[in-house]
Image (cartoon, grey):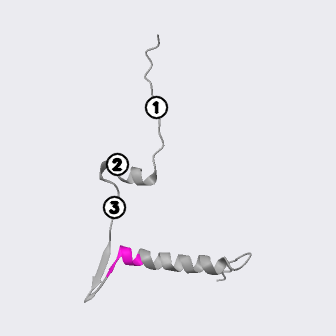
Amino acid sequence: MHSAPQVETVEISDAELDNVSGGLDPHASLVVGPTAVSDADVLAQIDAVKNEVLTTAGQYNHAGVSVSV
């Protein structure tokens, strides 16, 4: 009989990994006078822009980017 330790591995999702040891849930906000902007506001705007770009790009068979300095 072998006395080697037995190891079992399992795959966990990103959400499950975030919940390990309290998870990772950083937040940031910026307040200037009466105006406040939180990370959730910024992420919502980025998501809206991403959706608009993907919708527009989906109308064409290809998309390209040209940058010059």
Residue drawn at x 47%, y 13% is 2
Between marks 1 and 3, how big is the CA–CA gap? 29 Å
Residue under label 1: 8
Residue under label 3: 25
* Nearer to us in this view, 51 or 36: 51
Viewport quadrant of the C terminus: bottom right
> Magenta segment, which residues?
37-42
Measured along the vertical axis of the image, is residue 20 above or below residue 59? above
Residue under label 2: 20
Residue neighbourhood size for the residue with mark 1, other residues' Cα within 10 Å, grouped as few (<14), some (14–19), many (≥20): few
* Nearer to us in this view, 61 or 67: 61
Give the main secondary structure, helix, strand or loop, of the magenta stretch: helix
Residue type at mark 3 is: Asp
Residue drawn at x 72%, y 79% is 60
Residue neighbourhood size for the residue with mark 3, other residues' Cα within 10 Å, grouped as few (<14), some (14–19), many (≥20): few
Q: Which type of secondary structure does the marked residue at label 3 adopt?
A: loop
